[in-house]
């Protein structure tokens, strides 16, 4: 079966590269993926899949029925959106949309999803269970997975697989990770209210800027002294707004930041922990405060059994020297985690790095490029894992 999958994927390679380049040339921002979605729907239906459009606003679902009509289903998720970045590569198929670029490889993900659907559609007699392909919009704004789930994209799903490109792994190899793959990403707003006054007479005012600077340093110090160092927390204040003039003491400062964590329990305690620290600094200095903590996407926690299945499928396909078990998670975020509230899943990292280049630009870089030979690696890995999933659960 593996040989058959590899042959099908290799035969499809030129078409898949054409598809990927088409998507790369015509990137669309989060929530606006209407042309990409129409293109995806066209490819799916011409390969005989049952297609639903406008799932999760601009998302698409393609389904293969499987031979057992009563079976549950295995979901495969790929995302389709691009970023507000001006491309600076010299590729002949570079983005033609000004200021928009597939700099996170979602063009490759969409192509790998389509390629997997094309391969599996040609061997559907061998698949007892249903396979549902989720082409998700708006991953970059951490909304699309919620939209898809709200439109019942996970109904009857017994498991879900996902993929993300990774430039520091060479094309031809993949990475799997047991447990935490990415972090929970929450948003933080702190407002500090003091009392305005003359810059020459600070003792008659309550200086919100000085207090804000103490809040920031106290938070950073408190992380190192009060959070378990084996359960990482990263808090970054990325924006400060406040003050009106150089000689006027500011009465109001707004701090905006992001909070990353890996352990659900740690995460649950963070809002109270932050509020206590802010309160201690503000109370001591006579300022009022407000803390708004908004929970974003949770951490991606890869399921053990499904990760094992991915690893063994990839090792059979490519040999164990081309399958890395990643020792560390990332503190980036990924809304694949939203699906994991509905079924266990595992997301793997697809190597897209060029072996012969000294520099492979990171994700979200205006010169980010991928080695397109990775597309076949992704398709075979996913298609064979799907096949093995149904072999093992029947
Ligand atoms: Ni991405």
Image (tube, grey):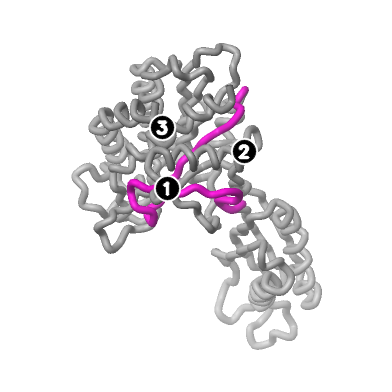
Asked where in the image residue 197 lies, by quadrant, the reply is bottom right
Rendered residue at 28%/42% (across/down): 373
Kindly report the distance in space between the C-alpha atoms of the residues bearing marks 3 and 1.
Answer: 24 Å
Label 1's element?
Answer: helix
Residue projecting furthest to the bottom: 200
Residue 168 location in percent, x, y?
38, 56
Residue 87 location in percent, x, y?
29, 51
- Which residue is denoted by mark 1 in the rendering? 320
Ligand 1 within 8 Å, label 1 CB: no
- Which residue is denoted by mark 3 in the rendering? 113
Residues in magenta, as a range: 156-184
Label 2's element?
Answer: helix
Asked if residue 173 lies in the magenta stretch, the reply is yes
Asked if residue 182 lies in the magenta stretch, the reply is yes
Instruction: Examine the rendered structure and indicate whether residue 261 appears above or below residue 343.
Output: below
Residue 73 visible: yes
Label 3's element?
Answer: helix
Kindly report the distance in space between the C-alpha atoms of the residues bearing marks 1 and 2.
Answer: 27 Å
């Amino acid at each position: 079966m593996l040989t058959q999958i590899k042959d099908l994927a290799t035969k499809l390679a030129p078409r898949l590269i054409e598809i990927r380049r088409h998507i790369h040339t015509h990137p669309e921002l989060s929530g606006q993926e209407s042309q990409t979605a129409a293109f995806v729907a066209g490819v799916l239906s011409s390969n005989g899949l049952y297609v639903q459009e406008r799932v999760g606003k601009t998302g698409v679902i393609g389904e293969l029925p499987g031979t057992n009509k009563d079976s549950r289903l295995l979901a495969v998720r790929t995302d389709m959106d691009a970023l507000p970045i001006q491309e600076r590569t010299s590729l002949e198929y570079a983005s033609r949309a000004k200021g928009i670029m597939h700099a996170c490889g979602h063009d490759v993900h969409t192509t790998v999803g389509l390629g997997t659907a094309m391969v599996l559609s040609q061997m559907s007699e061998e698949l007892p269970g249903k396979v549902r392909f989720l082409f998700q919009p708006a991953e970059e704004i951490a909304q699309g997975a919620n939209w898809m789930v709200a439109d019942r994209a996970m109904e009857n799903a017994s498991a879900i697989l996902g993929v993300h490109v990774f430039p520091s792994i060479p094309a031809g190899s993949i990475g799997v990770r047991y447990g935490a793959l990415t972090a929970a990403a929450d948003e933080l707003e702190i407002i500090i209210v003091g009392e305005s006054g003359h810059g020459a007479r600070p003792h008659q005012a309550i200086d919100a800027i000085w207090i804000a600077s103490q809040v920031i340093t106290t938070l950073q110090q408190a992380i190192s002294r009060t959070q378990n160092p084996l359960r990482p927390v990263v808090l970054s204040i990325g924006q400060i707004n406040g003050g009106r003039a150089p000689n006027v003491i500011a009465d109001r400062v707004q701090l905006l930041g992001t909070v990353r964590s890996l352990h659900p329990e740690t995460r649950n305690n963070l809002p109270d922990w932050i509020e206590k620290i802010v309160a201690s600094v503000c109370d001591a200095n006579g300022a009022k405060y407000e803390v708004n903590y908004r929970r974003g996407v949770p951490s991606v926690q890869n399921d053990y059994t499904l990760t094992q299945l991915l690893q063994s499928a990839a090792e059979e396909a490519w040999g164990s020297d081309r399958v890395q078990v990643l020792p560390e998670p990332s503190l980036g975020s990924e809304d694949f985690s939203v699906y994991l509230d509905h079924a266990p899943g595992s997301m793997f990292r697809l190597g897209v790095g060029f072996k012969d280049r000294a520099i492979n630009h990171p994700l979200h870089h205006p010169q980010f490029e991928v080695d397109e030979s990775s597309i076949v690696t992704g398709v075979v890995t996913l298609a064979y894992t799907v096949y093995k999933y149904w072999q093992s659960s029947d």
